Amino acid sequence: MKGNGGRYYDSGLIILGFSALHFVVSFGVFLLAFGGTMGRFESGVAPSLFGRVCDVAVDILWFPFMWVGGLLGIGKGRAEWLLLIANSLLWGVVLYGLLLLLKRFLVRISS
């Protein structure tokens, strides 16, 4: 697309791409962490290093919306999925903003 509208359209696609990537990664890491937890649930064995890393990664990737959902007492269901999608969209916007800052920084260094 030409003009400013095309630039905003491209930005939106990049944000959606980052958001989708964040959603897939965060949900995949959650499944890994959950599977590791269930595997040692009855035995009481301490989590492995990989399990602890997955737990921390889930906490980071699901911040801030899932944390807010916990404070508000939002239970399982559609609201939780909407929070997870909104969280991924927020991460997409932030990652796109960081990409623009990095691009601007590199342009200033090269000139």
Image (cartoon, grey):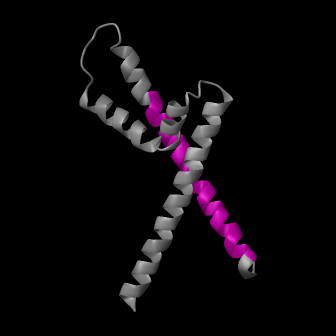
Residue reaching furthest top? 42
What residue appears at the point 65 percent right and 38 percent down from the top-left corner?
82
What residue appears at the point 46 percent right and 32 percent down from the top-left corner?
30
**Viewer can see residue 39:** yes
- Range shown magenta: 5-31
When the figure is inspected, residue 12 is found, relative to residue 61, above or below; the finding is below
Q: Position of residue 49 (x, y in %)?
A: 25, 31
When the figure is inspected, residue 38 is found, relative to residue 42, above or below; the finding is below
Q: Is residue 68 left or right of residue 14?
A: left
44 or 25, nearer to the observer: 44
Q: Quadrant of the N terminus?
A: bottom right
83 or 52, nearer to the observer: 83
What residue appears at the point 40 percent right and 80 percent down from the top-left corner?
106
Q: Position of residue 64 (x, y in %)?
A: 48, 44
**Viewer can see residue 20:** no
Q: Is residue 85 left or right of residue 50?
A: right
Specify whether residue 11 is painted magenta. yes
84 or 2, nearer to the observer: 84
Specify whether residue 64 is painted magenta. no
Q: Quadrant of the C terminus?
A: bottom left
Q: Is residue 84 left or right of residue 50?
A: right
Q: Position of residue 6 (x, y in %)?
A: 72, 74
When the figure is inspected, residue 2 is found, relative to residue 56, above or below; the finding is below
**Residue 93, quarter of the rendered image:** bottom right
Q: Main secondary structure of the magenta part?
A: helix
Q: How many marks?
A: 0
